[in-house]
Amino acid sequence: MDKNKHKIGTKVIHAGQSPEPITGAVMPPIFTTSTYVQPSPGQHTGFEYTRAQNPTRFALERMVAGLEGSGLSAEQDETNGGFAFASGLAAMATVLELFEAGSRVLAMDDLYGGSGRLFSKVRAHSQALDVVRADLSDADALRANMTADTKLVWVETPTNPMMKIADLGVIAKICKEINPGVVLACDNTFASPINQRPFEYGFDISMHSTTKYLNGHSDAIGGVLITNDAELAQQLRFLQMAVGSVMSPFDAYLVLRGIKTLDVRMARHNETGLKIAGWLETHEQVEKVIYPGLTSYPQHALAKQQMSGFTGMVSFTIKGGLDAAKAMLETVRLFALAESLGGVESLIEHPAIMTHASVPAEMREQLGITDGLIRLSCGIEDADDLIADLDQALAVGARAGVDSGAAAKA
Ligand SMILES: *Cc1c(COP(=O)(O)O)cnc(C)c1O
């Protein structure tokens, strides 16, 4: 039985999993060991040292490889091209180790703040990476910036927090035409493998911050890389071991446990996200709702073609600017005012002040990350309760917005 041929609702339970060989345990035990005994020097079971091999981490790595559809066999790569790291950024940083100093990288303009920071504040000087940022959701901008010596294209779709959709198929086609050897990587954190699988469009690497939807319970930081290319898998296996920012066995267990409910959680996130976005659109205190699942969304047709659901991430601008936004964020009761996303509990945040404060002001303005912009991560609570909470907080925000408007005029 090839467990990787199943539908994704079955894969989240079974992909890459087998009972523990000694006891038959259904879930892999947490192998909290740093090292493994050898009967004779160099003679071992395939497990020598946990930075290189750990059965609990391997179980998670095989799982995420199955979810993304890497297609790599155990002969091609021990964990089918899946690799787990201590954080999403550690995973991303390990991808960057694939390239020589001074390499040219083309990256999406709208990125997770920390990803942009890793490029511009760290690797631009420590590795002299020449990172060019452009709106890769625009084919003309892509063509204008893609060159034959570009080694890596780094895409995030939908983007955070503006929900821009990059057409993965178009990007793969154009970039591989210009440089067949380019590595195409997609940060798939926002979509989750339930809603979008980059390999289906010709990408080489999919990356996730497992901190978000994959783990889904806001209790562990982690990241994964998956590749469908046997050669890249070999390089990443070496780098994971040689650089060493690996995920701990305990965190691997937590993420694997979280993934078992990923399909049912995402169904609820998708449903609630759409319901709340639709409701916000009718609210008089709301200026604009940004949610790819809405028919009013400019890239709705593309989103529908590339994604099977649109997640619980909803951005909107409140009328009345910063004062209204602050008052609303201080007033929510069910939504927690916090960074991060993708957990079972609903979160709300202010990108300009919180998650995207590291983005230069000029770039924030260009992207539309304004003072009135609010981002929701809709959890899996009852949607009506969430709407009631937003409704009472929007009312308070409206009064604050009016007061500050009047004060400005006086
Ligand atoms: C959170 C996040 C990251 C970084 O992951 P960490 O686990 O926090 O290191 C990268 N990309 C996206 C889209 C994210 O949301």
Image (tube, grey):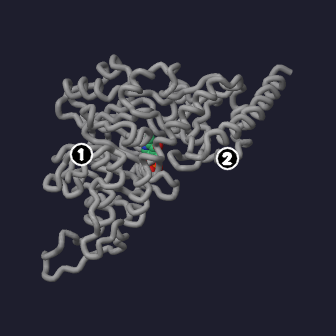
Q: Is residue 212 above or below residue 104?
A: below
Q: CA distance from mark 2 to mark 1?
A: 40 Å
> Residue type at mark 2?
Leu
**Which residue is at a point 36% across and 42% down the rendered structure image?**
193
Residue 298 image point, x, y percent: 47, 19
Label 1, secondary structure: give it: helix
Question: Is the CB of mark 2 within 8 Å of ligand 1?
Answer: no
Q: Nearer the viewer, mark 2 or mark 1?
A: 1
Instruction: Kindly tell me whether residue 252 is visible in this rendering.
Output: yes
Residue 276 image point, x, y percent: 60, 33
Residue 199 sits in quarter? top left
**Which residue is at a point 19% across and 28% down the rendered structure image?**
179
Question: Is the CB of mark 1 within 8 Å of ligand 1?
Answer: no
Q: Tag 2: Cα neighbours inside 10 Å, few (<14), some, or many (≥20)? A: some
> Residue type at mark 1?
Lys
Residue 93 image point, x, y percent: 35, 48
Count of numbered circles in the view:
2
Residue 405 image point, x, y percent: 79, 24
Residue on which the image places disc 1: 5
Residue on which the image places disc 2: 334
Residue 177 sits in quarter? top left
